[in-house]
Image (spheres, helix red, strand yellow):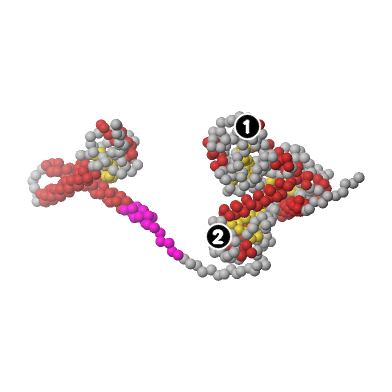
């Protein structure tokens, strides 16, 4: 049996003693290393590498960065080195005393008027000068060591103060009762109890809900703040923390005028409860509203939202399992397209597998497991749930961006064509096919859009836009807005540049442009017309909400058989 021991480094950086900028004759017992680099670390590497060929326990090296000499000693020779240094100091002190006595005798002999030749004392003068120089160097070395010791002591004291446990003080700050609301003003679920809400709400503790106002039944226990007095998240957070607005629960819905959408605010530490409420709301919308709208044959591959399991070979078409791909670093976080908070249908994304949202809750985890082979994807598309963004994403392999965009376009066309079948017939006068997306003409737009011309120099900007989502809006929902051609204008920057240059003429104040980067439509408005654009978006949101309500009433109404006409 062979026993091997791990050899410890005999020379280490902690076994170095600074000597100063000069050397003393009393340190001849330690040889000086000849090195080209001129550093302590290089000297230690040389000593550890050539250790079998070296017999000494102490060596001196010079550091060009510090401009000082250092005494390096072997591991286990600490006491021996200190003893030699003490002997050197004692011999140096004896030489200093002898030097002082010799210089005093020489002075007495010269003052007494001795007739001796001055050349006789030349050698003694030189020796005394050398000893004085060595003594000055030794004093400098001692001063340097003293300063280093002081710095080390200060550092140790600082570390000791940091390692001490901090004393926690229990401060019970008395707060005034912000008041109580009656049962008529708040539901019974909000009257559970009062909370100490000092700095419990923050702007980052919010989840976007979209431009449509959510129903109170979809968010049980949430307080709905007045959108006329509270028009921003910062104002809502400030009033909730100060006690001006009382929230007896942990959730509050606030309107953000700048983002044109509603947000769900939650207390510190209640993120999980807020996410569960949003998940329940998304499930209710998907099951009650969208399920009644889609044809029955589209639900063959649909699974319940609570499972969200990975699709098997039986659930996917044969084209999805054609072959295997080398998935090393083929999936990445940036190779994804946002689909929204509602789970898409399997029929809308053919060839895409649906990852389990209970085990994969982020894009990074999905990309890592797909690249490592832990999750097998035989196709090029995968749908993953992002818990932090509260939405679904379409992941695609590197180089398959065009295929992913085509799938999203087909899904948007399917949703748009299906929603168009629900709208009244009179709303389709200005509607065009999604494949064209051409600019509207005078015959397509109402007369109020042709009121007059405006000077459009730098009136359009990239930041003067409101996101409308991946589905093309109806012309009837945005009266007075022109629709730019998506084949020639594929980004907001190009649309803004062409509108400002006069290449595209817009007689009104609103324009709808397609962005390939964000895979969605945006409503551009002139500088100073933000209020008009917001009103148009509000009208569109109200119209969609009314359509949803009418559809629900139609589904819930009892069906009566009507007699067939002869």
Q: Residue 321 got which mark?
A: 1
Q: Which residue is located at x 66 percent, y 34 percent?
A: 317
Residue depicted at 32% across the width and 51% down the height:
152
Q: In this view, does 371 lie above or below 552?
A: above
Q: Main secondary structure of the magenta part?
A: helix
Image quadrant holding the N terminus, namely top left
Q: Which residue lies furthest to the top in this view?
A: 323
- Residue 453 appears in the rendering: no
Q: What stretch is highlighted in magenta?
A: 153-170
Q: Residue 32 location in percent, x, y?
A: 25, 37
Position of 59 relative to 542 (above/below): above
Mark 2 and mark 1 residues within 8 Å of each other at the beta carbon: no
Q: Residue furthest right?
A: 566
- Seen from the viewer's position, the closer of residues 224 and 449 is 224
State the residue at coordinates (60%, 61%).
249
Where is residue 95 drawn, in percent x and y?
16, 46
**Under tag 2, what secondary structure?**
loop
| Mark 2 or mark 1, whichever is nearer to me | 1
Question: In the structure shown, which secondary structural element does the residue marked by tag 1 occupy?
Answer: helix
Residue holding disc 2:
200
Percent position of residue 93, x then y: 17, 49
Name the one closer to the observer, 556 or 142.
Answer: 556
> Mark number for residue 133?
none
- The quarter holding residue 296 reads top right
Q: Where is residue 61 in the image (x, y as percent from the top left)?
A: 28, 39
Q: Residues within 10 Å of mark 1 (few under 14, many from 20)?
A: some
């Amino acid at each position: 049996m062979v026993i091997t021991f791990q050899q410890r480094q005999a020379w280490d950086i902690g076994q170095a003693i600074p000597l100063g900028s000069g050397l003393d004759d009393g340190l001849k017992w330690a040889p000086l290393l000849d090195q080209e680099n001129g550093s302590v670390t290089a000297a230690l590497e040389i000593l550890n590498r050539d250790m079998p060929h070296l017999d000494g326990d102490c060596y001196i090296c010079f550091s060009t960065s510090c401009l000082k000499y250092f005494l390096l000693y072997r591991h286990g020779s600490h006491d021996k080195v200190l003893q030699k240094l003490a002997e050197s100091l004692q011999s140096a002190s004896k030489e200093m005393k002898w030097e002082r006595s010799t210089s005093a005798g020489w002075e007495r002999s010269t003052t007494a008027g001795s007739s001796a030749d001055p050349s006789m004392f030349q050698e003694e003068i030189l020796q005394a000068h050398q000893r004085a120089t060595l003594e000055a160097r030794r004093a400098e070395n001692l001063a340097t060591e003293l300063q280093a010791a002081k710095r080390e002591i200060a550092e140790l004291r600082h570390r000791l103060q940091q390692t001490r446990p901090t004393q926690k003080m229990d401060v019970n700050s008395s707060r005034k009762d912000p008041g109580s609301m009656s049962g008529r003003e708040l539901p019974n679920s909000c009257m559970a109890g009062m909370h100490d809400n000092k700095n419990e709400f923050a702007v980052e503790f919010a989840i976007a809900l979209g431009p449509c106002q959510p129903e109170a039944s979809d968010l049980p226990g949430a307080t709905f703040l007045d959108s006329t007095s509270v028009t921003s998240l910062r104002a809502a957070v400030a009033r909730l923390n100060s006690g001006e607005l009382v929230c007896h629960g942990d959730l509050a819905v606030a309107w953000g005028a700048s983002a044109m959408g509603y947000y769900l605010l939650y207390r510190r530490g209640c993120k999980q409860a807020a996410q569960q409420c949003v998940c329940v709301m998304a499930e209710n919308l998907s099951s009650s509203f969208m399920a009644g709208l889609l044809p029955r044959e589209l639900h063959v591959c649909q699974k319940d939202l609570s499972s969200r399991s990975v699709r098997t070979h039986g659930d996917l078409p044969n084209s999805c399992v054609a072959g295997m791909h080398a998935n090393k670093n083929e999936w990445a976080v940036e190779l994804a397209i946002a689909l929204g908070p509602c789970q898409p249908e399997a029929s809308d994304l053919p060839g895409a597998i649906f990852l389990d949202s209970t085990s994969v809750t982020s894009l990074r985890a999905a990309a890592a497991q797909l690249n490592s082979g832990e999750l097998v994807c035989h196709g090029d598309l995968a749908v993953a749930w992002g818990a932090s963004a509260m939405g679904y994403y379409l992941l695609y392999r590197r180089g398959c961006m065009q295929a992913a965009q085509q799938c999203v376009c087909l899904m948007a066309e399917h949703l748009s064509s299906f929603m168009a079948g629900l709208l009244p017939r009179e709303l389709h006068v200005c509607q065009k096919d999604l494949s064209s997306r051409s600019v509207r003409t005078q015959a397509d737009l109402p007369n109020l859009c042709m009121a007059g011309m405006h000077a459009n120099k730098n009136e359009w900007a990239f930041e003067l836009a409101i996101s409308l989502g991946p589905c093309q809006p109806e012309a009837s929902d945005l009266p007075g807005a022109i629709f730019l051609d998506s084949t020639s204008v594929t980004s907001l920057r190009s649309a803004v540049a062409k509108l400002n240059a006069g290449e595209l003429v817009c007689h009104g104040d609103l324009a709808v442009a397609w962005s390939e980067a964000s895979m969605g439509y945006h409503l551009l408005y002139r500088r100073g017309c933000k209020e008009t654009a917001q009103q148009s978006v509000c009208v569109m949101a109200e119209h969609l909400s009314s359509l949803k309500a009418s559809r629900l009433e139609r589904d819930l109404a009892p069906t009566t058989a009507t007699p067939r006409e002869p």
